[in-house]
Image (cartoon, rainbow, N blue to C red):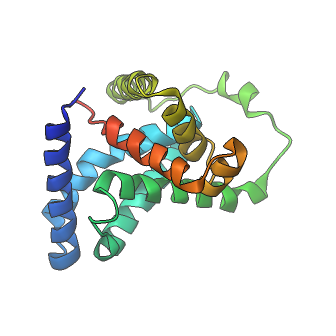
Amino acid sequence: MKSAEVRQEEQLRFAEYMRAVAEQRDKRAFEKLFDHFVPLLRSFSLAAQPGASLLADEVAQEVMIKVWQKAHTYNKEMANVTTWIFTLARNSRIDYLRKNSRHESDIDPTNLWGEIVDENSDPFQAAQQKRSEELISKQLKGLPEDQQNALRKVYLEGKTHKQVAEELKLPLGTVKSRVRLALRKLAISIPR
């Protein structure tokens, strides 16, 4: 697990990249953010819906487009870059699911996945995805139970902070604090 000092340095570097993207439209800085966050965003989506690669790709792409377009709205005083990007991811995932939920069918997808053979499977990508999922799962288990619960409800179940507060009968600020603390503790970096 990364030390607090290393995580803080990393967040400062990310904040500098965000400033460069916002002020100078710096493609190199954006590329660094992209390379770091896209695998994490894909893992975030796949943790909620295993096998939904299309959803994971769509959400990651949508989030990175928003990062490019809305970099000027990022305020480092309000949240660190990781929290800001994963909030975008959570909202993009919810929007994607809402937009596509109109096309529900009676077909049970669990029966389909067993029969489909992916002809374009990439063993390297599969291994990297598995390693990322294991790392996230391991680090998630290292969090206190209250933070794990809040994080799961917000990011994996797609609930708003307010819904989680009502469900757990907690003040809204407590839920937000637990989510923020959990994300800060996680500060996951996928080894390359």
Q: Is residue 108 visible?
A: yes
Estimate the x, y position of residue 136 in percent, counting from the top left.
40, 29
> In the image, is 16 to the left or to the right of 103?
left
Estimate the x, y position of residue 153 in percent, counting from the top left.
60, 41
Q: Is residue 52 visible?
A: no
The answer to whether residue 67 is above or below residue 34 is: below
The answer to whether residue 3 is above or below residue 65 is: above
Q: Tally the marks.
A: 0
Q: Nearer the viewer, residue 45 or 161?
A: 161
Residue visible at 75% across and 26% down in the picture: 111
Q: Quadrant of the C terminus?
A: top left
Estimate the x, y position of residue 131 in percent, counting from the top left.
35, 23
Q: Quadrant of the N terminus?
A: top left
Residue visible at 52% across and 40% down in the picture: 151
Q: For the view shown, which residue lies furthest in the right direction?
A: 106
Quarter of the image where one finds residue 2: top left
Residue visible at 46% across and 49% down in the picture: 177
> In the image, is 94 to the left or to the right of 178?
right
> In the image, is 139 to the left or to the right of 19?
right
Estimate the x, y position of residue 48 in percent, counting from the top left.
57, 37
The answer to whether residue 71 is above or below residue 135 is: below
Residue visible at 63% across and 57% down in the picture: 162
